[in-house]
Image (cartoon, rainbow, N blue to C red):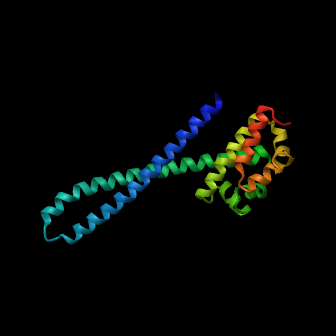
Amino acid sequence: MRNRQNVGLQKLLFDAKEALESLRKQMKVTENVIRGIEGHLATSKKTPGARALSEQPVRQVREESITYQKLFKTQRSSDSQERLRKLRALKTGFGLSHRELAGIVGVSERTIFNWLGGEASLNRLAREKIDKLFRVYDMVSREIKPEARRRWLFAQNELLGDSAHDLLVEGEFEKVLADIEAMREGVHV
């Protein structure tokens, strides 16, 4: 039941992200249209009546565009805060150093310091990795006690052929998730 809920929530989140991306693209098109109209208005000084008629709709579109941009900025800030929360949870939950976390995410140790300090924003690839890592962490948290998580992460796993940490560094999230699922089903000790 819990897996179906997680899948449903992930689908909902994916759909919301797609809708936001679509809206962001529409806003760019709208901005270009506004610039084009404003350019035509600037060149149509010979017909002041036409200019007056078109200025009101342009102003409304511009105001709506600004409103949407503010909403996106707020959404991005909220998403960024959520990912920072996930990053901190990963670091403390697995007992990772900045260097170890940087290795898994695929960035420099300095970048981790900057992110955790709120000095820099996360790029798209890092956001995706953090989301995948948090999915691993979430599943591990349900199966392994907090004091054993770090040991599990770095222990050599015969089924995986490597440690979960090494596989995560290589981007093999699905293998690690499959191992956790097998652990949940009692396939290995």
Position of 3 relative to 126 (above/below): above
Q: Nearer the viewer, residue 9 or 74?
A: 9
Q: Name the residue: 58% across, 40% down.
A: 10
- Residue 39: horizontal and vertical position, in percent? 27, 69
Residue 97 seen by the camera: no
Position of 157 relative to 58 (above/below): above
- Residue 79: horizontal and vertical position, in percent? 56, 48
Q: Name the residue: 22% across, 59% down.
A: 55
Quarter of the rendering containing residue 103:
bottom right
Q: Name the residue: 67% across, 59% down.
A: 114
Q: Quadrant of the C terminus?
A: top right
Relative to 29, is 124 on the left or the right? right
Q: Nearer the viewer, residue 165 or 141?
A: 165
Q: Quadrant of the N terminus?
A: top right
Relative to 33, is 1 on the left or the right? right
- Residue 162: horizontal and vertical position, in percent? 83, 51
- Residue 113: horizontal and vertical position, in percent? 71, 58
Relative to 139, is 10 on the left or the right? left
Q: Nearer the viewer, residue 128 or 39?
A: 128
Residue 174 seen by the camera: yes
Q: Name the residue: 40% across, 50% down.
A: 68
Position of 153 relative to 124 (above/below): above
- Tally of numbered discs: 0
